[in-house]
Image (tube, helix red, strand yellow):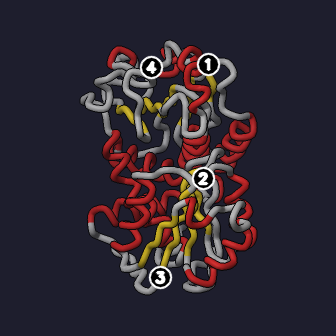
Amino acid sequence: MTLTRNVIHRDFLSMGDVSGAEARAVLTAAIALKSGELRPDLTGRSLVLLLEKPSLRTRVSFELGMRRMGGQSLSMLPQEVGLGGREPAADVAQVLSRYADVIAARVNAHRTLEELAATASVPVINALSDLEHPCQTLADLQTILERLGGLQGVTVCFIGDGNNVAASLAIGCALVGARFRIASPAGYELPDGVVSRAGAIAAAEGGIAPELLTDPRDAVTGADVVYTDVWASMGQEEERDRRARDFQGYTVTPQLMELARPESVFMHDLPAHRGEEVSDDMLEHPRSIVFDQAENRLHAQAALIAMLLGALPRPG
């Protein structure tokens, strides 16, 4: 892949859209951006962020990350665009490609991203879909790397729903040589397609295939990272009561953390539902690095944008 200004058209819809070497290059750049050692020059470049869902971390991190590199960012709310309703995604993509250098989209359905990417002539970034949340995983991997000093051989344990966050994390761990375990109740497992893709990536990259379990205690035992997410995501509010019943016993507590390695860390992509997937005190637990994760959305996404726009050296 040649990274040259005004030539590259590379989308990032899934963690599987980058190689292990590229993922590591983005993480290295993100850490350098955070420390101030690296400052890509994106003067005159612009990003449009399309939002179909409410956002705190996504909107702020994309906008400020772009501005810190000298570029411009514009966020557009659902009522202003109406993707697939007021205007087809394909038409929106063609118009925005004439205005901006990058399109990021936080959408309800992954197919909307695919429609944008199929027509856009500029990179399209998945800022969250129902299938994956790869930008979150970049920030997660950066945070683990900073805290534990490496990624190869690290055991990441995810407790809860095999959702979009878990899917991207499984693929991301496979890319960088980390071990991914997930404990989910029956009916909420990581999708077979994600397991197969992560397994194939792990085989190609010399990594480890995901491990699917049902007992949170088994999954957490000996883990370096304990990670969880809400039981009912946005759009699943009608399922909240049923999910609360199905996920009984899957709450991450200080007692559960004691089964992990002594130097283990706790992670959550936020927002959290205290008293459900986490006990009231877990975000402030001494092992919690939840707010480091949130901060690193800014740096990881900035590094990703810089790579897509050819402002980083070619990895490898």
Callout 2 touching callout 1 (CB < 8 Å): no
Rate crowding at label 2 as few (under 14), some (14 to 19) or many (20 or more) other CA atoms within 10 Å: many
Label 1: element kind? loop
Q: Amino acid at mark 2?
A: Met
Q: Locate residue 117: give its quadrant.
A: bottom right
Label 3: element kind? loop
Query: Is residue 21 in view from this perspective?
Result: no
The label nearer to you, 2 versus 3, is 3
Label 4, label 3: how many angstroms apart (C-alpha)? 44 Å
Q: Amino acid at mark 4?
A: Thr
Query: From the viewer's perspective, is 92 left or right of 222?
Result: right
Q: Locate residue 120: give its quadrant.
A: bottom right
Rate crowding at label 4 as few (under 14), some (14 to 19) or many (20 or more) other CA atoms within 10 Å: many
**Disc 4 target residue:** 251
Query: From the viewer's perspective, is 91 left or right of 297?
Result: right
Rate crowding at label 3 as few (under 14), some (14 to 19) or many (20 or more) other CA atoms within 10 Å: some
Q: Locate residue 28: give its quadrant.
A: bottom left
At a point 66% along the width and 27% down the height, the residue shown is: 189
N-term-proximal mark, 3 vs 1: 3
Label 2, label 3: how many angstroms apart (C-alpha)? 24 Å
Q: Amino acid at mark 1?
A: Pro
**Disc 3 target residue:** 45
N-term-proximal mark, 2 vs 3: 2
Who is closer to the viewer here, 46 or 207?
Answer: 46
**Disc 1 target residue:** 185
The numbered disc on residue 15 is: 2
